[in-house]
Amino acid sequence: MDLPVVVGVDGSEAGLAAVDWAAREALLRGRPLRVLHALPLMPHLLPSWSTGARSGEDVLHEARHVLAVRHPHVESRTEEVHDAVTSALVAASEDAELLVIGARGSGGFRELRVGSTALHVAARAGCPTVLLPVDGPGPEPREEVIVGVDARRPAEAALDFAFAAAERYGLALRAVHAGAVPPAERSGQAWRGETALLTRALLPWRAARRGVEVVEDTEYAVPGRVLTEASAKARLLVLGRRSAGRAGALGPVVHAVLHHAGCPVAVVPEG
């Protein structure tokens, strides 16, 4: 059975942008698209419920219109489930190849760049989750895929995902290994050692996908800042999510990138 690409919609512009992005991704992957809208059983009892809220059928009708006009060749289905949004999306991720959501939906305030729903789902989803930034891509060329790499403990699932994405898009892959290093340790030998670690970590994936051009980038700087700056010219930024530690916790690097990235960010669970 072909696992679908799942996209969550809530009636917001961000939700429609997610449908558009997810449909293009589904077509590239040769996968069906599942458009999901979640509605609690008694939404009027929720503090955030508005008497002017749109019906689920209206939300899904709008998504179907986007698909019919922009992506008529994508096999798709729309579905409304009665459940909390976070629960519905996490449950859907267990039977999906990819989950796509806006970093911020219809709730929250204008300056908020990533909402609580997106953070909750990214920390718990059973499949890779792509979060689309609040602001659309600027005029800069999007010529590469970026993957954040801890060269001492590489996240294998994230590397698999990033190499496959670069191959699918026909773009170069920039592998970024960054860390804040004390000035006393910033010798040429230390630099060469970090670069060698990154080269060694990437060898299996380079061998498996020889057609992917790889740029190795070792930086002596805060990882979140390096990755955020690099995202301004990236089509996609890929980060791993460790299963160890507190359940449902995202690391500081993932948090920083999700709040400031200038491109879609894929959070890929290990294991």
Image: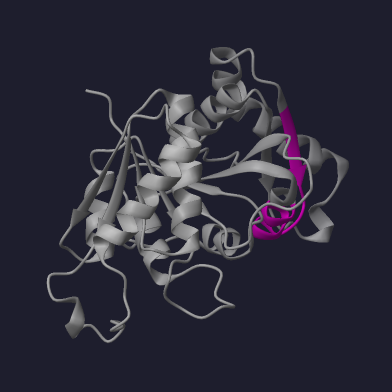
Is the residue 84 above or below the residue 108 in the image? Answer: above
Residue at 23 percent of width and 57 percent of height = 88
Does residue 15 appear left or right of residue 179 in this picture? Answer: left
Residue 226 in view (yes/no): yes
Residue 103 in view (yes/no): no
Quadrant in the rendering for residue 113: bottom right
Q: Residue 225 in magenta?
A: yes
- In x, y percent, where is residue 58? 31, 60
Residue at 28 percent of width and 84 percent of height = 51
Residue at 33 percent of width and 59 percent of height = 59
Magenta region, residue range: 215-229
Is the residue 42 above or below the residue 89 in the image? Answer: below
Does residue 19 appear left or right of residue 159 in this picture? Answer: left
- In x, y percent, where is residue 177? 67, 43
Q: How is the image coloured?
A: one colour
Is the C terminus in the top left, top right, bottom left or bottom right quadrant? top left
Q: Residue 245 in magenta?
A: no
